[in-house]
Image (cartoon, rainbow, N blue to C red):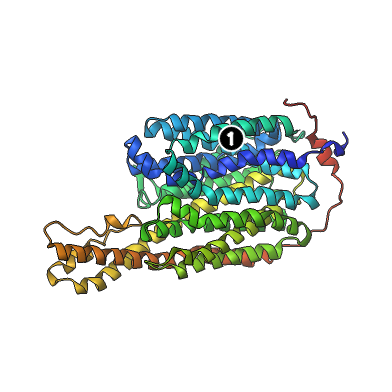
Amino acid sequence: MNPRRVTRPWLAISALCTGLFMILLDNTIVNIAVPSMMSDLGTGLDQILWIVNGYTLAYAVPLILAGRLGDRFGRKRLYVVGLVVFTLASALCGLSDTGGELIAARAAQGVGGALMTPQTLAFITVLFPPEKRGAAFGAWSGVAGVSTIAGPLLGGLIVEKLSWEWIFFVNVPVGVIGLVLALLVVPESRNASTQRLDPLGIVLVSTGLFAVIYALQEGSHYDWGVIAGPLSVPVLLVAGVVLVAAFLLVQQRSPEPMVPLTLFADRNFSIANVVATAVGFGMVALLPVTLFLQDVLGLSALECGLVTAPASVCAAMIAPFAGFRADRTGGKYLLVTGLLAFCAGIGGSALLAAPNMRVWLIVPAVIVLGVAMGLLFSTMTTVALRDVRPELSGAASAVFNTTRQLGQALGTAAVGALLQAALRTSTHREAATAAESLPVSVREQFVDSFTAVSAGSPARTVDAPAGLPTSLSAQWHQLGVGVFGHGFVTAMRWTLLLPIALLLIAAACSFGLRRTRKASRTVSPDTARLTETSHRPAE
C-alpha cells in the first residue's frame, strides 16, 4: 500500500488527544472535589482516598499489558474499547450514591484509561517518520502537560459552579465526540508478527506492579507496618520487586516477550525512562505548593487553580516547539534545560513561600514550572520513542508510561511521608518558641496540641481549649495560625529538596544522550506495512 495514503496523521493524532486529555485530567481534577464528596456521600477520608488511589492503581498496573494487546489485536480497536469503558465509567461515577459505587466506577475508569494511553503514543511512531515525530510528540505532551496542571482550575470551577458529579458527567459528551472522531479519522494499526500473548509474563508483571504501587500508595496509611496478619508493607514491596525481576528474567527467554529487553539497549530510551521516573516523582512536588496556597494562604480551590493556570498556558505553548526542536537538536540540552527549570520552579516556590505573603509573588515560580513542563514532556517522549521501530511501539510506549507512573507513586509515598515528618518537627519547634508569650499554665498544652499535626487545615490545629478567657483564646488562635504557617513553610522547603535532588540526577544522566542521525524523510517500509490506511469509518 502506498505510504502517501496516510494523508491525515495530524487529524488522527488530534482525535486521539481528545481521549488523552480526559484520562490524564482525571488524575488530578478529582482531588479538588474530595471535601464535597465526603459531605455528599457521607463517607470517611480512608474511603475517599481510594477514589483517587483506586483510579491510579487501576490505570498504572495494566499499561504494559494494554500496549501488548494493542500490538496484537489492533491499536485503534484497543483505544476505542478503552474510550467506551472510560466514558461509561464516567457516567457511573456521576450517578454513584455511595463511596463503594464510586470507587468501583473509578477503577473502571482507570482500566479504560490504561487501554487508551499506550495506543496514543504508539500511533505517533506508526504515522510519522522518525525525523517528524518530535512535533507530534510535542502536541501529545502539550495536551498531557496541560491536562495534568489544569485539573485544579477546572475542578475548582466545576465544583464551585455546579457540583462534584459534573467532574465526571462532562466526560460523557467529550468521550462521545472522541469516539466518533476515532472511528472516522484514525486508521487501524497492528503488529502482524505478534501471534500470542505470554500468560506467565502477564501474571508476573501485573501482580508485581500491583504489589509495588499498592505498597507505595498505602504505606503511610499502615505506618509502613502490618497490613493484615503476616502481610506488611515492606513484605509486599519486596514481593512486588521480586515479581517484576522474575518477569524481566522470563522476558529474556520468551520468543515473543511483552517487553522486548532490546528496547533498553537503546541508550536514549533507557535515559528517557530515568528522566520520566524523575519527572513523575517531581510532579508530586506540586502537592506541598497546593497545600501551601490553600491551607496557609487560605485560597479556595478555584483561586488556587487560577494561580497555577499560567503553568498550563506556558506548557501548552512550549511543548510543540520543544518537540519540533528535539527533532533537529537531539533533545539533550532541551531536556537538561527543562530539568534545571523544574528544579528552579520548585526551589523558587519554596524560597518565595511565606505566611501572609501576597499570592502573586509566587506566580513567577509557577510560570517557570510551566516552562519546565513544556520542555520536559515533549522532549523526553521524543527522545524515548523517536527511534523505536513501529512493531515495538506499543511495548515501548507502555513501558515509558509505566515508569512515569511508578515515579509518581514513589513520589507520592516519599514526599507525603517526608512532609508529615518535617511538619511535626517544624511545628513543634515553632510552637515551643511561640508558647513563651503565653501564660506558664498553658504553655505545655499549647505545644502538645501540635505534637501530632499533619498537613491539614490550620483550623484543626489551632483551636483553643474550652474554658480559656476570651482574650487568651484569641491569642492562642493567633499564635497557632502563625505556628502552622511558619512550620508548614519550613517543612515544605526541606521536603522539596528531595525531588530537586532526583531531578538534578536525571539532568546529569541526560548528558549521556547520544545525537541521533536524521532518518530518511520517507515513510519506512515497516510503517507502510503496519499502518492500514483505509478511510472507511470503522472496522
* Residue behind mark 1: 174
Front residue of 257 and 453: 453
SS at mark 1? helix
Q: Is residue 374 at least partly visible in the picture?
A: yes
| Residue in the picture at 46% in, 40% down | 54
Q: Position of residue 446 (x, y in %)?
A: 20, 65
Q: Position of residue 360 (x, y in %)?
A: 47, 64
Q: Position of residue 194 (x, y in %)?
A: 73, 34
Quarter of the image where one finds residue 512? bottom right
| Residue in the picture at 54% in, 43% down | 60
| Residue in the picture at 77% in, 26% down | 536
In the drawing, does residue 230 fall left or right of residue 377? left
How dense is the environment of label 1, judged by Cα within 10 Å: few (below 14), some, or many (20 and up)? some
In the drawing, does residue 216 fall left or right of residue 502? left
Q: Is residue 64 at least partly visible in the picture?
A: no
| Residue in the picture at 71% in, 43% down | 393
Quarter of the image where one finds residue 414? bottom left
Q: Position of residue 258 (x, y in %)?
A: 66, 40
Quarter of the image where one finds residue 66? top right
Front residue of 197 and 437: 437
